[in-house]
Image (cartoon, coloured by chain):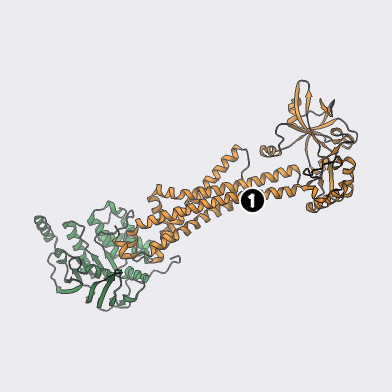
Chain colours: A green, B orange
Amino acid sequence: MWKKKKSQPVHETEYMGEDLIKLVDMVKVYDTGTIKVLGLHRVNLTIKRGEFVAIMGQSGSGKSTLMNVLGCLDRPTMGHYYLDGIDTANLEPDELSTVRNRKIGFVFQSFNLISRTSALKNVELPMTYAHVNQKAREQRAKELLERVGLGTRYEHMPNELSGGQRQRVAIARALANQPPLILADEPTGNLDTASSVEIMELFSQLHKEGATVVVVTHEEDIAAFTERIIRFRDGKLVSDTKNKPQIQTEEEAVTMQKEGSHAD
Amino acid sequence: MLIENMSMAFHAIRANKMRSFLTMLGIIIGIGAVIAIAAVGDSMRNLFTDAFKDVGLNRAAVMVSWEVDDFRMSDQFTRAEMDRIKDIFSDRIEYIDSNASNKVEAVNGRRKVSYQFQGVDYNYTDVQPLDIVYGRFLNESDVKGAANHVVLEDKGAIKLFGTADSVGRTFRMTLNKITQEYKVVGVYHKDMSPMVAMMLGNGQSQSGFIPDTVLTRSNDTFQAVNLYSRNGTNMRQLTVDLKQYVAKLKGRPESEIMAMSAVDQMGTMDAQLGTMSAAVGGIAAISLLVGGIGIMNIMMVSVTERTREIGIRKALGARTKDIMIQFLTESALMSACGGIIGVILGISLVKIGGTLLKMTVVVNPAVIVLAVGFSALVGIFFGLYPASKAANADPIEALRFE
């Protein structure tokens, strides 16, 4: 921290295998003290580089637990989770932090931007923890904000941005360290339909540019943007199907938005 | 990263200005008190040193203790005894007198001025140099011949004659019940700060010198012998030897003889000053402790309030150390800010006080550096627990925090 470490190119990894995510007999048990709750039951799952995947399930299905494990916020109780070739099962909390920093770009339902901190500084944050120098950080953050369509709002505070804009800042932040995995937890849960469509299109765009995107959601509309839908129920993987993304153009998105408002 | 942490900490402190200020208050008061006390202590020490320079650093006195129950006339010193003491210790004593002084009213026509006259020998100025501005000091013939000559301080001369240059002027006063005319042979000037004058207690009367042969009669006896040692004399040894000699002379045990020197007195005063400083310093330390606890308390609140932020930071890759340093920087900075404000407050208070008392105030720069550094340390120490609480938070729990 005090010594300036030489910043490394964060996208470089030794493991360049096809499987980005590999869960092997992964079990997650929550020990609440008196009773043990089975969160996930023997999950075997492989996600390849460049896939666009939706993980679906009702609340209590175990999809949040899976999200925590995939996001390296939590470790599996049994079995293995290989992320980009790294077995996370035996990593210390600080090592998990480093893995999160380099390998995962998070997008949360409630945006989770740091308040009273400018959009630019928020995007810079993962790079700060990766010890990227100030100048490079700022330049990259500006590029990313431009890319998500917020090129004029560097200095805005989160509370000066709309929900959709905040989520764009969060996506820019998720891309900061060029992580191999973009992990989005209900990214449209707090957004109106129009913003939801914009955000999902942004993910589609990233996917087309080669990013691996995993979206955890309970909304079919959202899952419909992805190419593969994995369903969970009661802590078990119940189905894993290919999906042909339906809505891809802005025109169609507008149609969907209208349908959505009719349905209300 | 350090700069990053500093700016984050500034941000956090500024975000809650009032709260941060109230939290700092303990440190502000503590450090302000420390600075003020240190400055007062240093200034007092300077003042004492000045005062003692005025009295004479090589001055000593010997007498039979006034605490003895059976005080006898023979316990007083005669002029012959004083001369004998001077002879015996002539290698170490340069000047000796009875320390006689008398408060009398000098009359010049309608002007009446109260004077405190000190009876001295002609070589007094050898041990206590005087700045003679007009005329001369008392000479050998003045003293030996018991001439009615005086040397006045310029202030007193102006009061009595309307002019400082009053050499050759005469006035009347009653000494030993005889009213006579006295002549001014010299005028001296003395620079003395009001505080020193107050401490020496001659604020009311004017001062002047008169031959001790005029002030006292040859058969008078004196309670104490007042002396000035030669340069380089070991004062402690001199007082011990004097005590021994006077005990033998007066036929009393040594415990009933008092011998003291200015140097000893100054040491005692210094020790008293030190005790006072330590006592008030202790209170300041308590204030700093309470201030530190205040910081700890508000940091705990801040950590709880910002649980979600901590969760976000951890999710984005902050390690335990990163969060720890972030919060430690914040508490250290808050405390150091309090320290700096405290230093400013302390110095201003002392400067204002010094101006009111017309005292020169000394502020030691080392004390300032020490105070600010120490307050930062207080911040780090009391920030440790909250910071480690933040650093060890579980990211999942923290992210879920509303």
**At which x and y percent is residue B159?**
73, 27
Q: Quadrant of the C terminus of chain B?
A: bottom left
> Observer-nearest residue: B90 or A202?
B90
Task: Give residue B7's quadrant in the image.
Answer: bottom left
User: Does residue A20 appear anywhere in the picture?
Assistant: no
Q: Which residue is mark 1?
A: B274
The vertical placement of B108 against B287, above or below, is above
Residue found at the very far top of the displayed protein: B110
User: Does residue B359 appear anywhere in the picture?
Assistant: yes
Q: Residue at x 86, y 33 (%)?
A: B214
- Report the label total: 1
B354 lies left or right of B12: right
- In what element is the residue under mark 1? helix
**At which x and y percent is residue A17?**
27, 79
Chain assignment, label 1 = B
Label 1 is placed on what type of residue? Answer: Gly
**At which x and y percent is residue B323?**
39, 62
B158 lies left or right of A213: right
B95 lies left or right of A164: right
> Observer-nearest residue: B268 or A48?
B268
> Observer-nearest residue: A175 or B303?
B303
Residue found at the very far front of the displayed protein: B69
